Amino acid sequence: MIVIKGVAASPGIAIGKAYTVEPEEIVVSRVEIPPESVRQEVKRFKGAIDATFRDLDQTEAKVLKMLGKEHAKLIDTHRLILSDPLITKDVSRRIAEERVNAEFALSEALERINRAFEKIQDEFFRERRHDLFDVGKRLLSHLMKQEKKTLSGIRAPAILVARNLLPSDTLNLRESDVLGFVTDLGGKTSHTAILAQSMKIPAVVGLSDASHRIKTGDELILDGDQGLIIIHPSPEAVTKYQKARIDALKEEEALDALRGAPALTADGHKVKMMVNLDGIDELKTVAALKPDGIGLFRTEYLFLNRTSAPAEDEQTKAYLAAARAFDGLPLVIRTADIGGDRTAHLGLETSKNEQNPFLGLRGIRLFLRHSELLKTQFRAILRAAGSGKVKIMLPMVTTLREIQSARRVFQQAVQELSAEGTPVNKKVELGIMVEIPAAALTLDALLEEADFVSVGTNDLIQYLLAVDRVNEDVAHLYDPFHPAVLRVLREIVETAHKRGKTVTVCGEMASDPKAAGLLVGLGVDALSVSSRMFLRIKQIIRRMSLERTREAVQQAAAQADSDAVRRVLAALDS
Ligand code: PEP
Ligand code: MG
Protein backbone atom coordinates (compact mmCIF):
# COMPACT_ATOMS: atom_id res chain seq x y z
CA MET A 1 0.00 0.00 0.00
CA ILE A 2 1.53 3.33 -1.05
CA VAL A 3 0.13 6.65 0.15
CA ILE A 4 0.98 9.86 -1.74
CA LYS A 5 0.01 13.33 -0.57
CA GLY A 6 -0.93 16.03 -3.04
CA VAL A 7 -3.22 19.04 -3.20
CA ALA A 8 -6.90 18.51 -2.34
CA ALA A 9 -8.50 19.95 -5.49
CA SER A 10 -12.09 18.70 -5.35
CA PRO A 11 -13.75 16.96 -2.38
CA GLY A 12 -15.13 13.41 -2.15
CA ILE A 13 -13.86 9.84 -2.09
CA ALA A 14 -13.35 7.61 -5.14
CA ILE A 15 -12.44 3.93 -5.04
CA GLY A 16 -11.67 2.04 -8.25
CA LYS A 17 -9.21 1.10 -10.93
CA ALA A 18 -6.77 3.58 -12.45
CA TYR A 19 -6.74 4.60 -16.10
CA THR A 20 -3.36 6.14 -16.80
CA VAL A 21 -3.10 8.57 -19.68
CA GLU A 22 0.29 8.43 -21.38
CA PRO A 23 1.58 11.87 -22.33
CA GLU A 24 1.28 12.40 -26.06
CA GLU A 25 4.74 12.84 -27.47
CA ILE A 26 4.72 14.90 -30.62
CA VAL A 27 8.11 14.76 -32.28
CA VAL A 28 8.77 17.74 -34.49
CA SER A 29 11.68 17.65 -36.91
CA ARG A 30 13.35 20.56 -38.65
CA VAL A 31 12.91 20.48 -42.40
CA GLU A 32 14.47 23.08 -44.66
CA ILE A 33 12.17 24.37 -47.37
CA PRO A 34 13.18 25.90 -50.70
CA PRO A 35 12.43 29.64 -51.20
CA GLU A 36 9.66 28.92 -53.74
CA SER A 37 7.74 26.87 -51.13
CA VAL A 38 7.69 29.57 -48.43
CA ARG A 39 4.34 31.00 -49.50
CA GLN A 40 2.76 27.56 -49.60
CA GLU A 41 4.17 26.74 -46.13
CA VAL A 42 2.80 29.97 -44.63
CA LYS A 43 -0.55 29.17 -46.24
CA ARG A 44 -0.48 25.70 -44.72
CA PHE A 45 0.16 27.26 -41.29
CA LYS A 46 -2.74 29.69 -41.72
CA GLY A 47 -4.96 26.78 -42.73
CA ALA A 48 -4.07 25.06 -39.44
CA ILE A 49 -4.98 28.22 -37.52
CA ASP A 50 -8.40 28.33 -39.22
CA ALA A 51 -8.98 24.65 -38.48
CA THR A 52 -8.05 25.24 -34.82
CA PHE A 53 -10.53 28.14 -34.60
CA ARG A 54 -13.22 25.76 -35.88
CA ASP A 55 -12.21 23.23 -33.16
CA LEU A 56 -12.59 25.95 -30.56
CA ASP A 57 -16.13 26.76 -31.74
CA GLN A 58 -17.08 23.13 -31.32
CA THR A 59 -15.45 22.89 -27.89
CA GLU A 60 -17.16 26.09 -26.80
CA ALA A 61 -20.57 24.64 -27.63
CA LYS A 62 -19.68 21.58 -25.54
CA VAL A 63 -18.49 23.61 -22.54
CA LEU A 64 -21.58 25.81 -22.65
CA LYS A 65 -23.79 22.74 -22.51
CA MET A 66 -21.80 20.95 -19.81
CA LEU A 67 -20.53 23.69 -17.54
CA GLY A 68 -22.21 26.95 -18.46
CA LYS A 69 -21.20 30.43 -19.51
CA GLU A 70 -18.51 31.20 -16.94
CA HIS A 71 -16.38 28.22 -18.00
CA ALA A 72 -16.98 28.87 -21.69
CA LYS A 73 -14.89 32.01 -21.18
CA LEU A 74 -11.89 29.67 -21.16
CA ILE A 75 -12.35 29.24 -24.90
CA ASP A 76 -12.00 32.99 -25.33
CA THR A 77 -8.57 32.70 -23.70
CA HIS A 78 -7.69 30.06 -26.30
CA ARG A 79 -8.93 32.30 -29.11
CA LEU A 80 -6.78 35.13 -27.77
CA ILE A 81 -3.71 32.88 -27.73
CA LEU A 82 -4.45 31.75 -31.26
CA SER A 83 -4.74 35.35 -32.50
CA ASP A 84 -1.63 36.53 -30.66
CA PRO A 85 0.97 37.98 -33.05
CA LEU A 86 3.62 36.02 -31.12
CA ILE A 87 2.10 32.97 -32.75
CA THR A 88 0.53 34.22 -35.97
CA LYS A 89 3.17 36.74 -37.11
CA ASP A 90 6.25 35.24 -35.49
CA VAL A 91 5.73 31.78 -36.94
CA SER A 92 5.10 33.09 -40.46
CA ARG A 93 8.20 35.28 -40.16
CA ARG A 94 10.35 32.35 -39.06
CA ILE A 95 9.10 30.21 -41.92
CA ALA A 96 10.06 32.95 -44.36
CA GLU A 97 13.36 34.03 -42.80
CA GLU A 98 14.74 30.72 -41.60
CA ARG A 99 13.12 28.66 -44.37
CA VAL A 100 11.89 26.00 -42.02
CA ASN A 101 8.75 23.94 -41.91
CA ALA A 102 5.71 25.36 -40.08
CA GLU A 103 5.77 22.65 -37.36
CA PHE A 104 9.34 23.52 -36.39
CA ALA A 105 8.75 27.29 -36.50
CA LEU A 106 5.69 26.84 -34.30
CA SER A 107 7.37 24.61 -31.72
CA GLU A 108 10.24 27.11 -31.44
CA ALA A 109 7.79 29.97 -30.89
CA LEU A 110 5.90 27.97 -28.26
CA GLU A 111 9.11 27.14 -26.43
CA ARG A 112 10.03 30.83 -26.29
CA ILE A 113 6.64 31.84 -24.92
CA ASN A 114 6.79 29.00 -22.40
CA ARG A 115 10.12 30.26 -21.06
CA ALA A 116 8.54 33.68 -20.54
CA PHE A 117 5.55 32.12 -18.74
CA GLU A 118 7.81 30.18 -16.37
CA LYS A 119 9.14 33.43 -14.96
CA ILE A 120 5.69 34.73 -14.01
CA GLN A 121 5.24 34.97 -10.23
CA ASP A 122 1.46 35.05 -10.21
CA GLU A 123 0.28 31.42 -9.89
CA PHE A 124 -2.93 31.96 -11.83
CA PHE A 125 -1.12 33.41 -14.83
CA ARG A 126 1.67 30.81 -14.68
CA GLU A 127 -0.97 28.07 -14.77
CA ARG A 128 -2.30 29.57 -18.00
CA ARG A 129 0.70 28.16 -19.87
CA HIS A 130 -1.26 24.90 -20.01
CA ASP A 131 -3.76 26.73 -22.19
CA LEU A 132 -0.88 27.73 -24.43
CA PHE A 133 0.24 24.07 -24.74
CA ASP A 134 -3.31 23.04 -25.43
CA VAL A 135 -3.66 25.47 -28.30
CA GLY A 136 -0.16 24.61 -29.54
CA LYS A 137 -0.94 20.90 -29.55
CA ARG A 138 -4.15 21.41 -31.48
CA LEU A 139 -2.28 23.48 -34.06
CA LEU A 140 0.48 20.91 -34.39
CA SER A 141 -1.96 18.05 -34.78
CA HIS A 142 -3.67 19.91 -37.62
CA LEU A 143 -0.32 20.59 -39.28
CA MET A 144 0.77 16.99 -38.90
CA LYS A 145 -2.68 15.72 -39.81
CA GLN A 146 -2.74 13.65 -36.61
CA GLU A 147 -5.94 12.91 -34.82
CA LYS A 148 -5.67 14.50 -31.39
CA LYS A 149 -6.10 11.56 -29.05
CA THR A 150 -9.18 11.79 -26.88
CA LEU A 151 -9.65 9.93 -23.64
CA SER A 152 -12.50 7.89 -25.04
CA GLY A 153 -10.38 4.73 -24.55
CA ILE A 154 -11.83 4.39 -21.07
CA ARG A 155 -14.01 1.31 -21.11
CA ALA A 156 -15.36 1.22 -17.58
CA PRO A 157 -15.64 3.91 -14.89
CA ALA A 158 -12.10 4.61 -13.67
CA ILE A 159 -9.91 7.08 -11.79
CA LEU A 160 -8.08 9.08 -14.42
CA VAL A 161 -4.35 9.46 -13.79
CA ALA A 162 -2.24 11.82 -15.90
CA ARG A 163 0.87 13.96 -15.83
CA ASN A 164 -1.38 16.89 -16.64
CA LEU A 165 -4.84 17.15 -18.08
CA LEU A 166 -5.24 19.80 -20.72
CA PRO A 167 -8.55 21.63 -20.71
CA SER A 168 -9.54 19.99 -23.99
CA ASP A 169 -8.84 16.52 -22.53
CA THR A 170 -11.14 17.02 -19.59
CA LEU A 171 -13.92 18.41 -21.73
CA ASN A 172 -13.97 15.35 -23.93
CA LEU A 173 -14.71 13.08 -21.02
CA ARG A 174 -18.04 11.49 -20.38
CA GLU A 175 -18.81 12.25 -16.74
CA SER A 176 -20.11 8.74 -16.14
CA ASP A 177 -16.69 7.28 -17.03
CA VAL A 178 -14.70 9.22 -14.48
CA LEU A 179 -14.66 8.43 -10.79
CA GLY A 180 -11.90 10.92 -10.02
CA PHE A 181 -8.91 12.86 -11.33
CA VAL A 182 -5.28 12.42 -10.27
CA THR A 183 -2.54 14.58 -11.81
CA ASP A 184 1.17 15.16 -11.24
CA LEU A 185 0.94 18.86 -12.02
CA GLY A 186 -1.49 21.61 -11.15
CA GLY A 187 -2.52 23.56 -8.09
CA LYS A 188 -5.79 24.65 -6.56
CA THR A 189 -6.49 27.03 -9.43
CA SER A 190 -5.59 24.65 -12.26
CA HIS A 191 -8.27 23.80 -14.80
CA THR A 192 -8.41 20.23 -13.59
CA ALA A 193 -9.29 21.51 -10.12
CA ILE A 194 -11.88 24.01 -11.35
CA LEU A 195 -13.54 21.59 -13.73
CA ALA A 196 -13.51 18.72 -11.22
CA GLN A 197 -15.29 20.95 -8.71
CA SER A 198 -17.93 21.97 -11.26
CA MET A 199 -18.43 18.36 -12.32
CA LYS A 200 -18.55 17.34 -8.63
CA ILE A 201 -15.83 14.75 -9.23
CA PRO A 202 -13.20 14.19 -6.50
CA ALA A 203 -9.67 15.22 -7.50
CA VAL A 204 -6.12 15.34 -6.13
CA VAL A 205 -3.51 17.30 -8.09
CA GLY A 206 0.15 18.27 -7.67
CA LEU A 207 1.28 14.68 -6.93
CA SER A 208 4.65 15.13 -8.74
CA ASP A 209 5.28 11.60 -10.14
CA ALA A 210 2.06 9.69 -9.50
CA SER A 211 1.47 9.06 -13.20
CA HIS A 212 4.78 7.10 -13.35
CA ARG A 213 3.97 5.06 -10.30
CA ILE A 214 0.42 4.15 -11.23
CA LYS A 215 -0.45 1.81 -14.08
CA THR A 216 -3.78 1.33 -15.78
CA GLY A 217 -5.72 -1.26 -13.80
CA ASP A 218 -4.06 -0.54 -10.43
CA GLU A 219 -6.47 -0.35 -7.52
CA LEU A 220 -6.69 3.18 -6.11
CA ILE A 221 -8.35 5.13 -3.37
CA LEU A 222 -8.60 8.89 -3.94
CA ASP A 223 -9.38 11.06 -0.95
CA GLY A 224 -10.27 14.49 -2.33
CA ASP A 225 -10.90 15.90 1.16
CA GLN A 226 -7.44 15.12 2.54
CA GLY A 227 -5.67 15.44 -0.82
CA LEU A 228 -4.17 11.95 -0.86
CA ILE A 229 -4.21 8.80 -2.94
CA ILE A 230 -3.56 5.21 -1.89
CA ILE A 231 -2.11 2.82 -4.47
CA HIS A 232 -2.81 -0.93 -3.96
CA PRO A 233 -4.87 -0.29 -0.81
CA SER A 234 -5.11 -3.06 1.77
CA PRO A 235 -8.54 -4.71 2.13
CA GLU A 236 -8.85 -2.90 5.48
CA ALA A 237 -8.25 0.49 3.85
CA VAL A 238 -10.83 -0.28 1.15
CA THR A 239 -13.39 -1.28 3.81
CA LYS A 240 -12.62 1.85 5.82
CA TYR A 241 -13.00 4.18 2.83
CA GLN A 242 -16.10 2.39 1.54
CA LYS A 243 -17.66 2.94 4.95
CA ALA A 244 -16.54 6.59 4.92
CA ARG A 245 -18.14 7.03 1.48
CA ILE A 246 -21.42 5.51 2.58
CA ASP A 247 -21.39 7.57 5.79
CA ALA A 248 -20.71 10.70 3.75
CA LEU A 249 -23.64 9.93 1.43
CA LYS A 250 -25.96 9.32 4.42
CA GLU A 251 -24.76 12.52 6.04
CA GLU A 252 -25.45 14.38 2.82
CA GLU A 253 -29.04 13.09 2.84
CA ALA A 254 -29.51 14.19 6.45
CA LEU A 255 -28.12 17.63 5.62
CA ASP A 256 -30.32 17.90 2.55
CA ALA A 257 -33.35 17.61 4.79
CA LEU A 258 -32.25 20.81 6.55
CA ARG A 259 -32.83 23.06 3.53
CA GLY A 260 -35.44 25.58 4.57
CA ALA A 261 -35.46 24.40 8.21
CA PRO A 262 -35.05 27.27 10.70
CA ALA A 263 -31.60 27.87 12.19
CA LEU A 264 -32.68 27.67 15.82
CA THR A 265 -30.39 26.46 18.59
CA ALA A 266 -31.60 23.51 20.66
CA ASP A 267 -32.67 26.02 23.34
CA GLY A 268 -34.65 28.06 20.85
CA HIS A 269 -32.45 31.04 19.86
CA LYS A 270 -32.58 32.19 16.25
CA VAL A 271 -29.31 32.60 14.36
CA LYS A 272 -29.44 34.30 10.99
CA MET A 273 -27.74 32.10 8.40
CA MET A 274 -26.51 33.72 5.23
CA VAL A 275 -24.20 32.57 2.44
CA ASN A 276 -21.04 33.97 0.86
CA LEU A 277 -21.19 34.32 -2.90
CA ASP A 278 -18.01 34.38 -4.99
CA GLY A 279 -19.53 34.83 -8.44
CA ILE A 280 -22.90 34.68 -10.19
CA ASP A 281 -22.33 31.21 -11.60
CA GLU A 282 -23.05 30.00 -8.05
CA LEU A 283 -26.48 31.67 -7.86
CA LYS A 284 -28.51 28.54 -8.50
CA THR A 285 -26.64 26.39 -5.98
CA VAL A 286 -26.81 29.09 -3.34
CA ALA A 287 -30.51 29.89 -3.84
CA ALA A 288 -31.29 26.16 -3.46
CA LEU A 289 -29.86 26.31 0.08
CA LYS A 290 -32.67 28.72 1.07
CA PRO A 291 -30.44 31.03 3.14
CA ASP A 292 -31.58 34.13 5.04
CA GLY A 293 -29.64 36.23 2.53
CA ILE A 294 -26.19 36.83 1.05
CA GLY A 295 -23.89 38.12 3.77
CA LEU A 296 -20.94 38.70 1.45
CA PHE A 297 -20.92 38.94 -2.33
CA ARG A 298 -17.22 39.05 -3.25
CA THR A 299 -16.98 41.03 -6.47
CA GLU A 300 -13.25 40.58 -7.13
CA TYR A 301 -13.93 37.92 -9.76
CA LEU A 302 -15.19 40.70 -12.05
CA PHE A 303 -11.83 42.50 -11.86
CA LEU A 304 -9.27 39.69 -11.98
CA ASN A 305 -7.63 38.09 -15.01
CA ARG A 306 -8.26 41.02 -17.29
CA THR A 307 -6.38 44.11 -18.31
CA SER A 308 -9.01 46.79 -17.68
CA ALA A 309 -11.71 47.25 -15.05
CA PRO A 310 -15.19 45.96 -15.90
CA ALA A 311 -17.53 48.61 -17.30
CA GLU A 312 -20.52 49.83 -15.29
CA ASP A 313 -23.02 47.93 -17.47
CA GLU A 314 -21.18 44.65 -17.09
CA GLN A 315 -21.14 45.09 -13.32
CA THR A 316 -24.80 46.15 -13.17
CA LYS A 317 -25.75 42.98 -15.03
CA ALA A 318 -23.99 40.79 -12.45
CA TYR A 319 -25.48 42.62 -9.45
CA LEU A 320 -28.95 42.58 -11.00
CA ALA A 321 -28.72 38.82 -11.53
CA ALA A 322 -27.85 38.37 -7.86
CA ALA A 323 -30.53 40.83 -6.66
CA ARG A 324 -33.19 39.03 -8.69
CA ALA A 325 -32.11 35.57 -7.50
CA PHE A 326 -32.56 36.63 -3.86
CA ASP A 327 -35.47 38.95 -4.33
CA GLY A 328 -36.50 40.38 -0.98
CA LEU A 329 -33.59 38.85 0.95
CA PRO A 330 -30.63 40.97 2.10
CA LEU A 331 -27.79 40.99 -0.42
CA VAL A 332 -24.54 42.51 0.83
CA ILE A 333 -22.33 43.46 -2.11
CA ARG A 334 -18.73 44.19 -1.15
CA THR A 335 -16.77 46.66 -3.25
CA ALA A 336 -13.83 44.85 -4.80
CA ASP A 337 -11.05 43.91 -2.38
CA ILE A 338 -8.17 43.90 -4.82
CA GLY A 339 -4.59 43.69 -3.56
CA GLY A 340 -2.88 41.30 -1.15
CA ASP A 341 -2.86 37.95 -2.94
CA ARG A 342 -5.64 39.06 -5.30
CA THR A 343 -3.45 40.79 -7.82
CA ALA A 344 -5.32 42.56 -10.57
CA HIS A 345 -3.59 43.70 -13.72
CA LEU A 346 -5.77 46.67 -14.52
CA GLY A 347 -2.92 48.87 -15.69
CA LEU A 348 -3.25 51.17 -12.68
CA GLU A 349 -0.22 53.34 -12.27
CA THR A 350 0.12 52.24 -8.62
CA SER A 351 0.14 48.48 -9.19
CA LYS A 352 3.89 48.27 -8.73
CA ASN A 353 5.82 45.74 -6.74
CA GLU A 354 5.01 45.94 -3.08
CA GLN A 355 7.21 44.46 -0.36
CA ASN A 356 4.20 43.59 1.79
CA PRO A 357 1.12 43.40 -0.42
CA PHE A 358 -1.15 42.42 2.48
CA LEU A 359 -0.15 45.64 4.22
CA GLY A 360 -0.28 47.67 1.07
CA LEU A 361 -2.71 49.20 -1.34
CA ARG A 362 -5.57 46.79 -0.85
CA GLY A 363 -9.38 46.99 -0.67
CA ILE A 364 -10.82 50.42 0.09
CA ARG A 365 -7.30 51.92 0.10
CA LEU A 366 -6.84 51.10 -3.59
CA PHE A 367 -10.36 52.16 -4.52
CA LEU A 368 -10.06 55.50 -2.73
CA ARG A 369 -6.77 56.11 -4.54
CA HIS A 370 -8.61 55.37 -7.80
CA SER A 371 -11.98 56.75 -6.80
CA GLU A 372 -13.33 56.44 -10.35
CA LEU A 373 -13.30 52.65 -9.82
CA LEU A 374 -15.21 53.05 -6.56
CA LYS A 375 -17.74 55.41 -8.13
CA THR A 376 -18.35 53.10 -11.07
CA GLN A 377 -18.92 50.19 -8.72
CA PHE A 378 -21.28 52.26 -6.52
CA ARG A 379 -23.23 53.37 -9.60
CA ALA A 380 -23.51 49.80 -10.86
CA ILE A 381 -24.70 48.56 -7.45
CA LEU A 382 -27.16 51.44 -7.09
CA ARG A 383 -28.61 50.71 -10.52
CA ALA A 384 -29.22 47.11 -9.43
CA ALA A 385 -30.48 48.06 -5.98
CA GLY A 386 -34.03 48.80 -7.12
CA SER A 387 -34.62 45.06 -7.10
CA GLY A 388 -34.04 43.38 -3.78
CA LYS A 389 -32.63 44.49 -0.46
CA VAL A 390 -29.15 45.49 -1.52
CA LYS A 391 -26.51 46.77 0.90
CA ILE A 392 -22.95 47.87 0.19
CA MET A 393 -19.92 46.87 2.24
CA LEU A 394 -16.41 48.35 2.23
CA PRO A 395 -13.40 46.04 2.70
CA MET A 396 -10.22 46.71 4.68
CA VAL A 397 -11.42 49.80 6.54
CA THR A 398 -8.95 51.17 9.12
CA THR A 399 -10.10 54.73 9.77
CA LEU A 400 -13.23 56.83 10.11
CA ARG A 401 -11.93 59.09 7.35
CA GLU A 402 -11.97 56.20 4.86
CA ILE A 403 -15.68 55.65 5.47
CA GLN A 404 -16.35 59.39 5.16
CA SER A 405 -14.42 59.57 1.88
CA ALA A 406 -16.22 56.54 0.51
CA ARG A 407 -19.54 58.11 1.52
CA ARG A 408 -18.68 61.24 -0.45
CA VAL A 409 -18.00 59.13 -3.56
CA PHE A 410 -21.26 57.30 -2.86
CA GLN A 411 -23.18 60.61 -2.71
CA GLN A 412 -21.62 61.66 -6.03
CA ALA A 413 -22.81 58.40 -7.59
CA VAL A 414 -26.34 58.98 -6.20
CA GLN A 415 -26.42 62.57 -7.48
CA GLU A 416 -25.13 61.63 -10.93
CA LEU A 417 -27.68 58.87 -11.36
CA SER A 418 -30.52 61.10 -10.16
CA ALA A 419 -29.43 63.86 -12.57
CA GLU A 420 -29.44 61.29 -15.37
CA GLY A 421 -33.01 60.38 -14.47
CA THR A 422 -32.20 56.93 -13.11
CA PRO A 423 -34.36 56.16 -10.08
CA VAL A 424 -32.09 55.52 -7.10
CA ASN A 425 -32.90 53.83 -3.84
CA LYS A 426 -31.27 56.33 -1.47
CA LYS A 427 -31.76 54.05 1.51
CA VAL A 428 -29.06 51.61 0.43
CA GLU A 429 -27.00 51.02 3.56
CA LEU A 430 -23.23 51.44 3.60
CA GLY A 431 -21.47 49.09 6.01
CA ILE A 432 -17.93 47.96 6.69
CA MET A 433 -15.87 44.82 7.06
CA VAL A 434 -14.17 44.68 10.45
CA GLU A 435 -11.01 42.82 9.57
CA ILE A 436 -8.21 45.05 10.79
CA PRO A 437 -7.54 45.13 14.57
CA ALA A 438 -7.57 48.95 14.56
CA ALA A 439 -11.12 48.91 13.19
CA ALA A 440 -12.19 46.41 15.85
CA LEU A 441 -10.73 48.55 18.64
CA THR A 442 -12.27 51.82 17.41
CA LEU A 443 -15.56 50.33 16.32
CA ASP A 444 -17.54 52.72 18.54
CA ALA A 445 -16.24 55.63 16.45
CA LEU A 446 -16.62 53.84 13.10
CA LEU A 447 -20.23 53.02 13.88
CA GLU A 448 -21.00 56.74 13.73
CA GLU A 449 -20.55 56.42 9.96
CA ALA A 450 -21.07 52.72 9.19
CA ASP A 451 -24.62 51.42 8.91
CA PHE A 452 -23.65 47.83 9.66
CA VAL A 453 -20.62 45.63 10.36
CA SER A 454 -19.46 42.22 9.26
CA VAL A 455 -16.36 40.61 10.70
CA GLY A 456 -13.81 39.24 8.25
CA THR A 457 -12.02 36.77 10.47
CA ASN A 458 -9.70 35.61 7.67
CA ASP A 459 -7.93 38.93 7.68
CA LEU A 460 -8.63 39.83 11.29
CA ILE A 461 -6.72 36.73 12.43
CA GLN A 462 -3.94 37.39 9.90
CA TYR A 463 -3.38 40.93 11.16
CA LEU A 464 -3.99 40.20 14.83
CA LEU A 465 -1.53 37.30 14.97
CA ALA A 466 0.85 38.68 12.31
CA VAL A 467 0.51 35.49 10.29
CA ASP A 468 0.38 35.77 6.50
CA ARG A 469 -2.78 33.86 5.56
CA VAL A 470 -1.21 32.34 2.44
CA ASN A 471 2.26 31.49 3.77
CA GLU A 472 2.53 27.73 4.39
CA ASP A 473 5.57 28.16 6.66
CA VAL A 474 3.51 29.96 9.27
CA ALA A 475 0.21 28.19 8.63
CA HIS A 476 0.50 26.37 11.98
CA LEU A 477 0.45 29.76 13.73
CA TYR A 478 -2.77 30.84 12.02
CA ASP A 479 -5.11 30.01 14.86
CA PRO A 480 -8.79 31.05 15.21
CA PHE A 481 -8.72 29.66 18.77
CA HIS A 482 -6.00 31.99 20.01
CA PRO A 483 -7.53 33.73 23.06
CA ALA A 484 -6.65 37.10 21.46
CA VAL A 485 -9.07 36.31 18.62
CA LEU A 486 -11.84 35.46 21.08
CA ARG A 487 -11.24 38.62 23.10
CA VAL A 488 -11.30 40.90 20.07
CA LEU A 489 -14.47 39.25 18.77
CA ARG A 490 -16.10 39.68 22.17
CA GLU A 491 -15.15 43.36 22.13
CA ILE A 492 -16.63 43.82 18.65
CA VAL A 493 -19.93 42.20 19.65
CA GLU A 494 -20.18 44.24 22.88
CA THR A 495 -19.46 47.54 21.14
CA ALA A 496 -21.91 46.90 18.30
CA HIS A 497 -24.70 45.68 20.58
CA LYS A 498 -24.30 48.71 22.85
CA ARG A 499 -25.12 50.83 19.79
CA GLY A 500 -28.02 48.66 18.79
CA LYS A 501 -26.23 47.14 15.79
CA THR A 502 -26.11 43.46 14.89
CA VAL A 503 -22.88 41.60 14.11
CA THR A 504 -22.34 39.19 11.22
CA VAL A 505 -19.22 37.07 10.75
CA CYS A 506 -18.45 36.32 7.11
CA GLY A 507 -14.88 34.98 7.42
CA GLU A 508 -14.07 31.27 7.23
CA MET A 509 -14.41 30.93 10.99
CA ALA A 510 -18.19 30.97 10.46
CA SER A 511 -17.82 27.99 8.10
CA ASP A 512 -15.59 26.04 10.49
CA PRO A 513 -17.63 23.32 12.25
CA LYS A 514 -15.44 23.69 15.35
CA ALA A 515 -15.72 27.49 15.52
CA ALA A 516 -19.25 28.39 14.36
CA GLY A 517 -20.85 27.52 17.72
CA LEU A 518 -18.20 29.54 19.50
CA LEU A 519 -19.15 32.63 17.47
CA VAL A 520 -22.82 32.19 18.34
CA GLY A 521 -21.80 31.79 21.99
CA LEU A 522 -19.92 35.09 21.74
CA GLY A 523 -23.19 36.79 20.77
CA VAL A 524 -22.71 37.01 16.99
CA ASP A 525 -26.17 37.50 15.42
CA ALA A 526 -25.60 36.20 11.91
CA LEU A 527 -23.17 33.87 10.19
CA SER A 528 -22.36 34.16 6.51
CA VAL A 529 -21.02 30.81 5.46
CA SER A 530 -19.51 29.25 2.34
CA SER A 531 -22.18 27.46 0.33
CA ARG A 532 -20.34 24.14 0.73
CA MET A 533 -20.59 24.29 4.54
CA PHE A 534 -23.99 25.98 4.88
CA LEU A 535 -26.14 22.96 5.79
CA ARG A 536 -23.46 21.43 7.98
CA ILE A 537 -23.19 24.62 10.03
CA LYS A 538 -26.96 24.86 10.27
CA GLN A 539 -26.97 21.31 11.67
CA ILE A 540 -24.40 22.33 14.29
CA ILE A 541 -26.46 25.38 15.30
CA ARG A 542 -29.57 23.26 15.67
CA ARG A 543 -27.75 20.86 17.98
CA MET A 544 -26.05 23.42 20.23
CA SER A 545 -27.29 24.99 23.43
CA LEU A 546 -26.68 28.73 23.41
CA GLU A 547 -26.82 29.04 27.19
CA ARG A 548 -24.18 26.38 27.78
CA THR A 549 -21.94 27.64 24.97
CA ARG A 550 -22.15 31.21 26.26
CA GLU A 551 -20.68 30.19 29.61
CA ALA A 552 -17.97 28.03 28.04
CA VAL A 553 -16.95 30.81 25.66
CA GLN A 554 -16.45 33.31 28.49
CA GLN A 555 -14.26 30.78 30.24
CA ALA A 556 -12.41 30.05 26.97
CA ALA A 557 -11.61 33.71 26.36
CA ALA A 558 -9.91 33.89 29.75
CA GLN A 559 -7.41 31.12 28.89
CA ALA A 560 -3.73 31.70 28.21
CA ASP A 561 -3.38 29.82 24.94
CA SER A 562 -5.34 28.06 22.22
CA ASP A 563 -4.73 24.55 23.61
CA ALA A 564 -6.53 25.58 26.76
CA VAL A 565 -9.28 27.25 24.69
CA ARG A 566 -9.78 24.02 22.73
CA ARG A 567 -9.94 21.98 25.95
CA VAL A 568 -12.67 24.22 27.36
CA LEU A 569 -14.68 24.00 24.14
CA ALA A 570 -14.19 20.22 23.81
CA ALA A 571 -15.63 19.77 27.30
CA LEU A 572 -18.88 21.23 25.91
CA ASP A 573 -19.34 18.23 23.61
CA SER A 574 -18.65 15.60 26.25
C1 PEP B 1 -12.23 37.91 5.58
O1 PEP B 1 -11.18 38.55 5.56
O2 PEP B 1 -12.58 37.18 6.53
C2 PEP B 1 -13.16 37.97 4.43
C3 PEP B 1 -14.36 37.46 4.49
O3 PEP B 1 -12.70 38.57 3.31
P1 PEP B 1 -11.71 37.88 2.25
O4 PEP B 1 -11.52 36.45 2.67
O5 PEP B 1 -12.38 38.03 0.94
O6 PEP B 1 -10.49 38.70 2.41
MG1 MG C 1 -10.86 40.05 4.09
Image (cartoon, grey):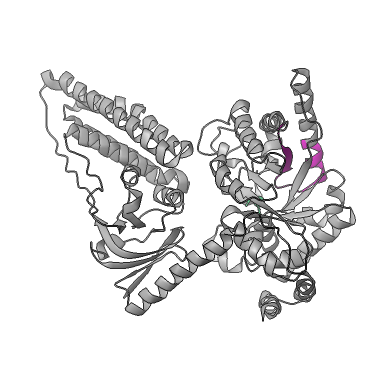
Q: What residue range appears in magenta?
A: 387-406
- In the image, is 426 to the left or to the right of 8? right
Q: Is residue 506 above or below residue 380?
A: below
| Image quadrant where one finds the C terminus | bottom right
For the residue pair 301 and 391, the one nearer the viewer reads as: 391
At a point 16% along the width and 30% down the height, the residue shown is 101
Residue 485 falls inside the magenta stretch: no
Q: Which sits in the foreground, 6 or 515? A: 515
Q: How many marks?
A: 0
From the top left corner, tell me how far across and down residue 472 is, in percent.
52, 62
Residue 392 inside the magenta-drawn segment? yes
Where is residue 382? Give x, y as percent.
72, 31
Residue 431 point in image, percent of width and height: 77, 44
The residue that appears at 65% across and 36% down in the rendered structure is: 324
In this rendered view, identify the residue nearer to me: 51 or 465.
51
Asked if residue 108 can be seen in this view, the reply is no
- Residue 534 in view here: yes
Residue at horizontal 83%, vertical 48%? 446
